[in-house]
């Protein structure tokens, strides 16, 4: 009986060591939180309503007409749904303005702060009004 108790306690103590990574989350550490960039006249190429994050894929032209492909990560569908989003909020071909925090590591990638649709509707990624202050993490 005593050995079963010791084995059970040992297994229970070891559980977090082997399963701790299941509870890990990357947060927003890979994005520059000090500045929001605004990309106007962005043409949506695809909107992925999927876990763990909704993704906005879009093209932006520079002043010379060159097209740049972008990817914007938003919150999970369950989180942004609380902010008024749904899987049909943005569709391929829509022309939008995208506000995002740039990636620290990848070019043309960012974390969506908000999307402004052609009709002026704003889809925010978060109810926070801190505009990316580091203290929010």
Image: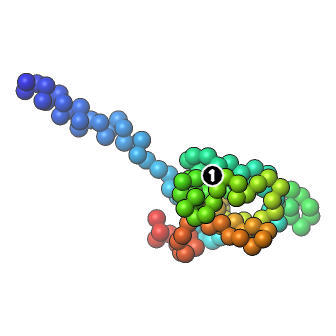
Task: Establish if 113 lies above or below 17.
Answer: below
Say which residue appears at 61% left-offset and 63% top-offset.
84
Quarter of the figure that contains the N terminus: top left
Q: Give the left or right position of residue 127, taking residue 4 as reference.
A: right
Say which residue appears at 23% left-offset and 38% top-offset.
13
Q: Position of residue 81 (x, y in %)?
A: 58, 58
Q: Quadrant of residue 83?
A: bottom right
Q: Residues within 10 Å of mark 1 (few under 14, many from 20)?
A: many
Query: What secondary structure is marked by label 1?
Result: loop
Q: Residue lying at the far left in this picture: please name it.
A: 2
Q: Quadrant of residue 86?
A: bottom right
Task: Establish if 2 lies above or below 126.
Answer: above
Q: Residue lying at the far bottom in this picture: please name it.
A: 129
Q: Give the left or right position of residue 77, taking residue 41 as reference.
A: left
Q: Position of residue 18 (x, y in %)?
A: 35, 35
Q: Position of residue 14 (x, y in %)?
A: 27, 35
Q: Give the left or right position of residue 113, taking residue 57 as reference.
A: left
Q: Nearer the viewer, residue 71 or 79?
A: 79
Task: Establish if 48 lies above or below 33.
Answer: above
Q: Which residue is mark 1?
A: 54
Can residue 48 be spotted in the picture? yes
Can residue 40 be spotted in the picture? no
Q: Residue lying at the far right in this picture: please name it.
A: 64
Q: Position of residue 9 (x, y in %)?
A: 17, 34
């Amino acid at each position: 009986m005593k050995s079963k108790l010791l084995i059970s306690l040992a297994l229970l103590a070891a559980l977090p060591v082997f399963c701790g990574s299941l509870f890990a989350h990357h947060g927003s550490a890979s994005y520059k939180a000090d500045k929001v960039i605004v990309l106007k006249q962005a043409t949506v190429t695809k909107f992925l309503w999927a876990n763990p994050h909704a993704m906005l894929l879009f093209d932006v032209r520079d002043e010379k007409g060159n097209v740049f492909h972008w990817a914007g990560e938003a919150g999970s569908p369950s989180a942004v749904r609380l902010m008024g989003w749904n899987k049909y909020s943005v569709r391929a071909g829509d022309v939008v303005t995208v506000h995002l925090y740039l990636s620290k590591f990848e070019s043309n990638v960012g974390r969506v702060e908000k999307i402004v649709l052609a009709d002026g509707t704003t889809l925010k990624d978060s109810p926070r009004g801190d505009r990316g202050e580091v203290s929010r993490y």
